[in-house]
Image (cartoon, grey):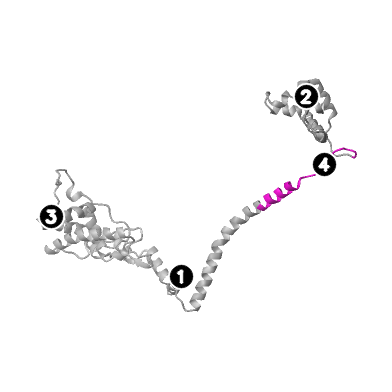
Amino acid sequence: MIRTCFPSLPSCAVQVAEFALASVVWHVEFLEQTLPPNHRLFFTPIFRDREQLMELKSLVTCRLNSPGDTIVATGVPPHISILQHMHSLAKNVNDVVPQIQKVAPEVIRGVIDEIEKRAMTAGTVTRDGLEAMINGCLENSALYQLVLTLKNSPTPAIQQEETLTGDEAGTMTPMWGSHLWGGRIHPVPQDFAFPNSCSQIAWQYWMCGDRQKRYPPLRNLSRDDMPSTNMRKRLSDLQYLMQLVEKRVEEQEKWIANPSIEQANEMFEVGKDVLDISDVSEKGRKRRGLQMKWTSMVTQVRNKRKSHRTS
C-alpha cells in the first residue's frame, strides 16, 4: 500500500511514509469535513477505495511511544524552544517600555533640578531658579493670599454700591477686580474681550466699566493689560474713537469724571456728532450709522478724516 500511494518514494523513507499514511488514515473524517471535495488528496488511490480505507483505519492506533517501536519521538525541536524564549523576551520588552516612558519625565525633572542646584551654588542665575525665588518671595509676603482675597471676596465698597442708585452710585469709586496673569496684576482677566456692540455701548464701557464683572472704565486700561497683540490693536482702536467723543464733550463743558450710565449716555449725546456717519455708503448702500459696531465705526471715521485731509 505504501508503494501504491507513494510510487516514487525512495526506500530510505518508507518508514516516514508509513507514519504519514497512518496520519492521513486516522484523520480521514476531519480531512473530508475540512478540505473541498475537489482537493487533490481525494484523487489518490487510498480515497478511491472506501473499504480499504476503513480497513486501514482499524489498524491505526493513537498512543504514546512504546518499547519496540521502530520510530521514536525526538521531542520538541530546538528552534521551537528558542522561539518561545524570544516571544517571552518581546513581551517583557513591551511591558518595560511604558514604565520607561513613565519614569522618563521624573528623571529629566530630577536632572534639571540638580543642574539648577549646582547653578545656584555656583552663583549662576537661571530662568527656573529666578522664577522659583520670585514665587517664594511672593508667597512669603502673602501677596498671593491678598490677591485671592480681593478676587474672591466681595468688598464693602461693592456691597454699599448695590444699595445706591442714580447720581450717588455714579459718583462712587467702586473697588474693581484684580487678576494675576503673565506675572503681573491686571484690572481685567486674561480672557477679557471688548464689547461687540455699537459705539454708545462702547462709550458706556469706556466711562463706567462693568460693575457686575468688576471691570474698571476701559479708559483706564493700558496696552500692558492686553493679553495679545490683537487685543492691544483693539484697545488702540477704541482709544482713538472714544477720545474723539471725549474731546467734543470737554469742548462743550459737559465732562463728568465718574459718571453713572445715565450721565454717560447724556455725555455721548453731546459728543456723538464727531461720529456722524451717513446712513448711505459711498456705493449707495444703506447702513445703520451710529448703530453699526464700534469696530466698523473706527474704520469709517478714519477713512472719512483721511479723505478730508487729502481733499
Q: Residue furthest right?
A: 68
Q: Earlier in the sequence, mark 1 or mark 2?
A: 2
**Could you tell me residue 160's position as x and y percent?**
31, 64
At numbered mark 1, what does the secondary structure look like: helix, strand or loop? Answer: helix
Residue 209: image tag: none
Q: Earlier in the sequence, mark 1 or mark 3?
A: 1
Residue 85 within the segment the image draws in magenta: yes
Q: Give the amino acid at mark 2.
A: Ile
Classify residue 206 by image quadrant. bottom left
Which residues lie in the magenta part?
67-89
Q: Earlier in the sequence, mark 2 or mark 3?
A: 2
At numbered mark 3, what does the secondary structure look like: helix, strand or loop? Answer: helix
Classify residue 25 by image quadrant. top right
**Could you tell me residue 189's position as x and y percent?**
35, 61
Q: What residue sits right under mark 2 in the picture? A: 46
**Could you tell me residue 144's position as x and y percent?**
42, 69
At numbered mark 2, what does the secondary structure look like: helix, strand or loop? Answer: helix
Write the residue at 27% across / 52% down. Answer: 196
Residue 128: image tag: 1
At numbered mark 4, what does the secondary structure look like: helix, strand or loop? Answer: loop
Q: Give the amino acid at mark 4.
A: Ala
Q: What residue sits right under mark 4 in the picture? A: 73
Nearer-the-camera pick, 44 or 132: 44
